[in-house]
Amino acid sequence: MNAEPDDLALDAPPALVEGTARVVALDGDRVWLEPEPRSGCGSCASAGVCGAKGIGTAANRIEARRFPLHDHLGLTVGERVVVGVPENALLKATSAVYAVPLAAALGAGAVAQWAAGSDGVTLAAMIAGLALGMLVARLGAGRLGTRGDLAPRLLRRAAPGETCERD
Amino acid sequence: MQEYVLLMVGAALVNNVILARFLGLCSFMGVTTRLDTAIGMGLATTFVITVSSMLNWGAQEYLLDPYGLGYLRTVVFILVIAAAVQFTEMTVRKVSPPLFQMLGIYLPLITTNCAVLGVALLVVEGKMGLLGATLFGFASSVGYSLVMVIFAGLRERLALADVPRLFAGPPIGFIVASLLALAFMGFSGISTH
């Protein structure tokens, strides 16, 4: 009996969200990578070098996001590589960081408005809820990090002209 | 309660930020080539629009209105939005550095998203209370995210379709966006908000 396409999809490995990065330093068997910025125009490879460097610039933000990975490809400084993160981990991460604090703030605001009926009290309750939500998000993110779900994987060398945007 | 539900349905579907008010069109066309980027951008924007709606309401109520500084509204709102984005970025970095590496790239883009400022100005125009303003901001951004995700899904399918060369890329994207806008016009019968 032939397998349906959906059955095959269930057996497939988890989908990866891919991005491109550049090797900026070598450290024993590890490489330090700098992610290439994503832009709406699809010219991510050039976006990191089109602005001046300094506080608050795109280049400065990218420098702050360098990360190390185990090198199993024998890379050299300046090479571009493709790294991937499991798609479901990305969804869990975004939910943990944004949805939890937002739900806590809105919930606290609704309860305060119902109980006190004053905008000042509601504002204070929303800010407190947001702070509490951030704390819960920190615990959730810490658990995801401990399990290693958020660690990017080194997939392959980037082909010439390959960018983070799919055509 | 019913008032808030109608307000949210109206903000998310009937007067959708992208398809009815035509705000945030840059990110609508630019960040929807992939579903994962659309989801990331949508969630980050939802967070920032909701938080900045709340803070902008506070600035309007406790600073601009009492001191007669209404003419500074746009400047103050832009400042509050930029501060909210910066605060969010710092918090995400503090909460989890790996998450910041994955998600942080969307945040600077939001500062220049006109949908954020547009929603804040609509809140003032609507003379809403704090909870109403925050829920309006939340529902508007949920509507924004919904359209982003639908459009990204359609564009991912379009990438596999046999589109005539003349229409390939942005042209067929605009045609699909117009059909999506027509579909959303169907919601205009639901509510008068």
Image: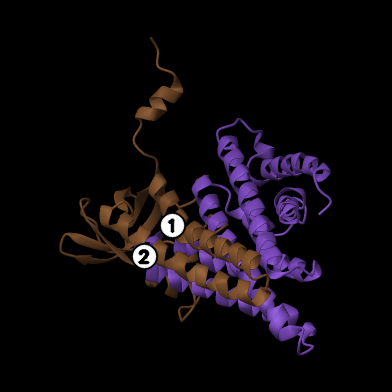
A146 w.r.t. A129: above or below: above
Which label is found at residue A96?
1
Query: How far across and down, in percent of the image, does residue B133 sit?
Result: 70, 66
| Residue occupied by mark 2 | B96
Q: Which amino acid does the dot numbered 1 rest on?
A: Ala
Q: Is mark 2 on a helix, strand or loop?
A: loop
B58 w.r.t. B104: above or below: below
Observer-nearest of B17 and A164: B17
User: In the rendered picture, chain B carries what hue?
Assistant: purple
- In screen coordinates, is B20 left or right of A105? right
Task: Report the chain holding disc 1.
Answer: A
Numbered disc in front, either 1 or 2: 1
Is disc 1 in contact with disc 2, using a CB cutoff of under 8 Å?
yes
Task: State whether residue A158 appears in this view.
Answer: no
B59 w.r.t. A61: above or below: below
Label 1: few (<14), some (14–19) or many (≥20) C-alpha neighbours in 10 Å: many
Q: Which residue is drawn at 46% across and 81% down?
A: A55
In this picture the colour scheme is by chain
- The quadrant of the rendering that contains the N terminus of chain A is top left
Tell me the quarter of the picture where residue A115 sits. bottom right
- In screen coordinates, is B4 left or right of A39? right
- In screen coordinates, is B74 left or right of A96? right
Q: Using the numbered discs, state the Cα–Cα distance from disc 1 to disc 2 in whole angstroms.
A: 10 Å
User: In the rendered picture, chain A carries what hue?
Assistant: brown
Query: How far across and down, in percent of the image, does residue B47 sit?
Result: 56, 62
Q: Which amino acid does the dot numbered 2 rest on?
A: Ser
A123 w.r.t. B62: above or below: above
Are marks 1 and 2 in one subunit? no
Observer-nearest of B135 and A88: B135
Task: State whether residue A114 appears in this view.
Answer: yes
